[in-house]
Image (spheres, coloured by chain):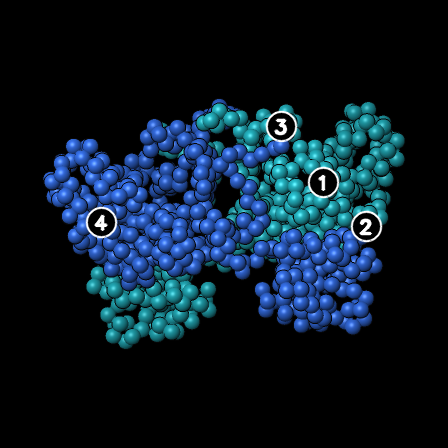
Chain colours: A cyan, B blue
Amino acid sequence: MTTPQTLKGFRDFLPETMTIRNKVISTLKAVFESYGFAELQTPTLEYAEVLTGKYGEEAEKLMYLFKDPGNRAVGLKYDLTVPLARLMTQYPDLPKPFKRYQIQPAFRAENTQKSRYREFYQCDIDTIGTTSPLADAEILAVISDSLSALKFSDFTIRVNSRQILFDLIIKSGISSDKTFTVLQIIDKLDKKPRTEIEVELASKQVDQLQINNLFSLLDTAQPDPKLQEIIDLGIKLGARNVQFSPFLVRGLDYYTGAIFETIVEKPKIGSITGGGRYDQLIKTLGGPDLPAVGTTIGLDRICDVIADLNLWPNLPKSPAQVLVAIFSPDLYSPALKLSRSLRESGVNTELYPNPNIKLDKQLKYASAKNIPFIAILGPEEISQNSIKIKNMQTSEQQNLSLENLKNYLEIRN
Amino acid sequence: MTTPQTLKGFRDFLPETMTIRNKVISTLKAVFESYGFAELQTPTLEYAEVLTGKYGEEAEKLMYLFKDPGNRAVGLKYDLTVPLARLMTQYPDLPKPFKRYQIQPAFRAENTQKSRYREFYQCDIDTIGTTSPLADAEILAVISDSLSALKFSDFTIRVNSRQILFDLIIKSGISSDKTFTVLQIIDKLDKKPRTEIEVELASKQVDQLQINNLFSLLDTAQPDPKLQEIIDLGIKLGARNVQFSPFLVRGLDYYTGAIFETIVEKPKIGSITGGGRYDQLIKTLGGPDLPAVGTTIGLDRICDVIADLNLWPNLPKSPAQVLVAIFSPDLYSPALKLSRSLRESGVNTELYPNPNIKLDKQLKYASAKNIPFIAILGPEEISQNSIKIKNMQTSEQQNLSLENLKNYLEIRN
């Protein structure tokens, strides 16, 4: 190989990117755990028969299926839901409702595009084992708190119900065998004008009267009492910007009740969560007969947007708050001592490792690594029992005692 | 399939296990970052040619190599060092020294045994791009701080140098072409008595005089000045229990200078870290010519021991600090309000989702999930403007005002 490379659709996360990812993940985890959701992880590999025959042929073309060194048919996980179904069967005694979140990579050999990767992180929050509307409402509150915690304040949580859509299609006179065809077409209303959608519906033998009926019913639709209860409970739990959206379909066929989607307007991210109630899916996937409700959050997209738009400019770009420079080879020992003392006070401190390198090169190193401060102990500082501290961004520098330096660095960071 | 299963050597991490793992990982990360090591992650899959031809035939038998859906030859990562070498070539402009830590799964189709898994976590800390002894010393300090932070106080960090071993073998009269054979045999001294080791050496045509010479030289060996400097610097940086151990070999052939190993005596874990200086390896693995020093920490083993011996009994076993129970269906709303109010005060609060379930079943649920407290709002409490709080472990219960309840839960946890 000439130059070694990562596979297309796979990524290295360099330290600066990791800082953003870690902050996003810890922010989300804190919200999930505040509602009592607990973390779960499942293996990267599963038996192929756990993965296949679940989501249809198209999905299976994207799966990484292969033989392991012991000739077992295995596969990389395609999502977090199939392993969850497997797990619920394997551990029947888990107390229900089982409230879990899971943040792990999944693998799909898709065509790559912006914010779409072959190894991508899924971030799923689900409540398994209850049909209570409070569980649905809690998902709305978790989404709202999550986006607020990420400082995405301008969002709308769209809510609809599969049952409402089914009822309106029947009411409009369309025969029930066309339900999913019609839903799939309506689902494109976000991307296409209504006139185009009408043409598409007509091409599927839905007549103009039925189309008119359907749109007029959708335009004036109201939540049914069950969905209204979920919305009301969600708002009581603190969910903001919840909006009944009768045109919301959500692509996947497996939803059985409420469906949710979140659009973030600012920054302009678009759809960032998708979920709903799926009372049959876990059984269909080979698990026990357990109702469930949950959402997925688009973690990779959130991280990409925060990085691309520099939304968190104050996030430390380096784990070290300060670089202790080495003034000259003979002043190695006081620098080392200073680094230990700062570290023991809770200041993340990198000690420049080489006493034979000139000071200006050490400054360049601090700058390249985005370390915000550099501490220097030269002969003058040592004789005055002080430390020179330089702010790498403003170039300000001052001499401080050790105690004042500790306070200064702790306050600054 | 009758009952779906995980693959042998692969694990689900249920919530209680995740709690321990998360705590171990966050404890270690805090130590690594306090020295300025930054987190890196690389993909699960690499091109097969990145992975193969690096560690010999035996290693390759254990690799998960396969064709992806696009017919590319790919493989699951076997360790974190080969991807690091690939990365150092791909990003030549990373400021050096590049100090990174990486905590990610690696995959080896090994025979499974206790604390040895086919998907296992590696936890590597390395400084790339400097030969300074301070970098070696810092690894000793990081190991020491890490074990102290994990509350493993009874440990020994064994230190030796490949150069010292090479020199003593020559000095004892053994021909230099037998160096690695002799090292491999001496390496077993931890597991076998010296007499057996002598027999094994004799079987490799090392004569008795040479054997006697070698052992007497090893018994009286002293660190060379370079190793002594590393030890001294390590101690100055805060490393505890560092011990020169002339019999320490470390299996891998690629070490070129200092070698380290940590034995934890209490709890009786045995070897928990291994590392050293490897100035040629990154180049050998296809990377640029960069010296490096680092260590790996046995994360899975640490987590297993903490769980098996219940070393962290006070670690919360549930994300929720309190379960808000629902006294009766008509008292649903005050319970919901209470859950929100506690959550907003920073108390992780699970609300029981179903108002139609009897109170004693809700108590059992809290107990099964190890939620330490349960809060109950019955008619009496509501009329008194108080909340009943029950400690699930002691069965103590008392009525508190909302403010006092918040303080009580925050202080307790």
Identify residue type, mark 3: Met
Query: Is B242 located above or below residue B215 in the figure?
Result: below
Discs 2/1, front: 1
Discs 3/2, front: 3
Q: Can residue A132 be seen in this view?
A: yes
Pointer 1 local density, CA inside 10 Å: few below 14, some 14–19, many at least 20? some
CA gap, disc 1 to disc 3? 19 Å
Q: Residue A228 carries which label?
A: 2
Chain letter of mark 2 equals A
Q: Which residue is drawn at 30% across and 39% down?
A: B252
Q: According to the image, label 4 marks what residue?
A: B246
Q: Earlier in the sequence, mark 3 or mark 4?
A: 3
Q: Is mark 2 on a helix, strand or loop?
A: helix
Q: Which residue is drawn at 70% across and 35% down?
A: A283
Asked if labels 2 and 3 touch by Cβ distance under 8 angstroms, the answer is: no
Chain letter of mark 4 equals B
Q: According to the image, label 3 marks what residue?
A: B1
- Residue B328 in picture, x, y percent from top left: 81, 58
